Image: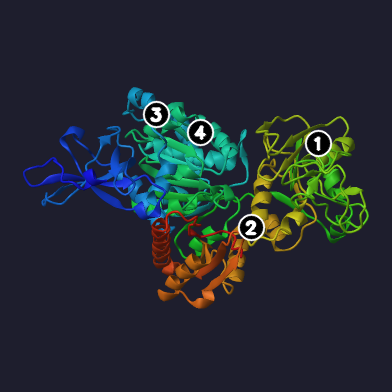
Amino acid sequence: MPEARAERETATTGEGRRIARVLIDSPLPQLDRLFDYALPDHVGDVVPGVRIKAPLRTAGRVVDGFVVEIDVEPDATRTLSEIDSVVSPTVVMPDRLYRLARRAADRAAGSASDILRLAIPKRQVRVEKSWTPVEEAADVEPDALSSALETISRYEGLAEVVAGSQRAAVEAIPVQEGSEPGWATLLASLAAAQLASGRSSILVVPDYRDQELLQTALEQLVPDHAIVRHDARQANPDRYRAFLRTLDDAPCVVIGNRSAVYSPAQAGLVALWDDSDPLLAEPLAPYVHARDAALIRQEQEGSALLFVAHSRSTDVQRLVQHSWLHDITATRRVIPNVRLSTPQELEQTMGQRVPSSAFATARAAAAEGPVLVQVARPGFAPSLVCATCRHPARCRQCGGPLGARRRGAVPVCGWCGRSAHSWRCTECSSDQVRLASSGTERTADELGRAFPGVRVIVSDGTHTVQHVDERPALVVATRGAEPVAAGGYRAVILLDGARMLQAPELRIGESCLRWWSNAAALAAPAAPVHLVGVDGPVARALATWSSAAYARSELEARMPLHMPPTARFAQIEGVPASVRAALDVLVGIGVPKEGVLGPVPIDDDGRMRALVRFPYAAGQGVADALRASVVADAAQSRRGRGRQRIPLAVHLDILEPDI
């Protein structure tokens, strides 16, 4: 681009010329740095944080970007390209947001622009032009504030932690406050207290169900106009309007999913609900977990930070043991009435799905109100086996598991969706299948026949139910999709526990404890909670409501093996030469060879994968080295233009190491 290299007329001051340092919005890793641009007179007064368009001489085109800094350069002889135009005078990237994105990206060996893409919505011109900044603070009614402070007082030392802008892990009381779960009432109360003191709050939850519950609880304590939703399901204008509201000086309450943690609001409190839920792990590069982003934000901005949950994650427990987080529990603990299976019932569950005691409890409770039955999977029969030899029934096209949508239906593949009209077993050639598992619909069908006259409600990924009333009902739900019952469930039956625990995952124990704890918290006071067919440490932790002790024991077991979260892991994928070059760089900076697992081939395209285990103290050095390897690989790919190359990809802090 010869014209970009030519000397241009630039805006100057008495001491030199004005320049802007710009972050280019680009997925290319080699462009993840600040570029100097001259500021011509025609762009007017440019301030940090605005959107601009600037020429990118290496690509010969005009690209989007954000102004990070404005400076005056004494030496005006240096050749610089000029900013093409200012897209909007609105400051959409405050300095605090840029510093958060930069720090989070550096920790994860990623690009700041990838994080800013999650935090800053696309510009909506009409919304921006019609937006009027909010300047007045929202008032919290005295009665609402009194109720909020009473809720906060139920937790030992919580008010002091928030007032001192400290960090804490909070064990939520497993009760319902009216029609909302106790955790939602607690977060709403904390936000109301912050709003009354003139400060904003950011409340991060895993999914839309939690968001709806939290918003309902908030609407009872704070004015509607002070609640700002950060929701990927919103229309683009609504999302941008909400984003502009968080830029105002007037305090607000931001509620949303994982990317809400990057909200530019000047928050006095950041709180995460259920941090071990996998939905809080960002699936897009650079894969920064909302928990890690919140920790970075608290370190930079000094806000209060709370991790609220019924079940303690090992990640949070590690921080508690390192005195990085305070441990907050209720002043008067409430423990659900959990009943474990007896040895005789454990034997019964080998051939009987619901033992007699749980069945009798459900029958008695169903006469009074709703009963929750939690199952592992949705659908009718998610998996089938050969009726003769019990070999798993698999799709002939893709090898996926075959399931049935109803009794007597043609088997359907759970992966590709193809119907297996003429299926035959590959082991014994039988053409008969047997139902090997029960999903929500089959369980509802069976319970409907066992409880005539009682309505049956199914809640799963396909059938979404948020609330049920006090009338008698059997509510069959998958884990995480349990509706909230008015007054609480009269009984909770947790099925398929043994099947859940058999999943080949490192964190399956704490995941099951989280699923069961959240379901048990929906029970009415003193209502029985039956955990069917499970014994051992996880069952005892649920019965005694001691998830922190279970997380502590899990950390002790993982410590000798250096498994997450006692150590950090990095996953590296790419062509063999690129992966080995990155590993050589890591070994060169001191990562021990015994901490490198692989590389091994992972597909037919020539890609390989390696895992690197390293201590937290070496984290920034490893991240910097991996980022340099990614940039070097991208630059080499550009020099070899014309050849199809597989880029080097890195993922730090993977939750489930797999090689």
Q: Position of residue 555 (x, y in %)?
A: 58, 67
Between marks 3 and 2, how big is the CA–CA gap? Answer: 43 Å
Could you tell me the amino acid type at mark 2? Glu
Crowding at dot 3, Cα within 10 Å, few <14 / some 14-19 / many 20+, comes out as some
Q: Position of residue 633 (x, y in %)?
A: 43, 61
Between marks 4 and 2, how big is the CA–CA gap? Answer: 29 Å
Mark 1 / mark 4, whichever is N-terminal: 4
The numbered disc on residue 124 is 3
Does residue 124 appear to the left or right of 431 in the view shown? left
Q: Quadrant of residue 407 in the image?
A: top right
Q: Nearer the viewer, mark 3 or mark 2?
A: 3
The residue located at (56%, 64%) in the rendering is: 609
Residue at image mark 2: 510
The local secondary structure at tag 2 comes to: helix
For residue 590, say whether it is visible: no
Could you tell me the amino acid type at mark 4? Leu
Mark 3 / mark 2, whichever is N-terminal: 3
The local secondary structure at tag 4 comes to: helix
Q: Position of residue 192 (x, y in %)?
A: 45, 36
Q: Position of residue 262 (x, y in %)?
A: 42, 44
Q: Quadrant of residue 261 in the image?
A: top left
Mark 3 / mark 1, whichever is N-terminal: 3
Residue at image mark 1: 366
Crowding at dot 2, Cα within 10 Å, few <14 / some 14-19 / many 20+, comes out as many
Q: Residue furthest front?
A: 642
Query: 265 and 365: which one is in front?
Result: 265
The residue located at (73%, 51%) in the rendering is: 338
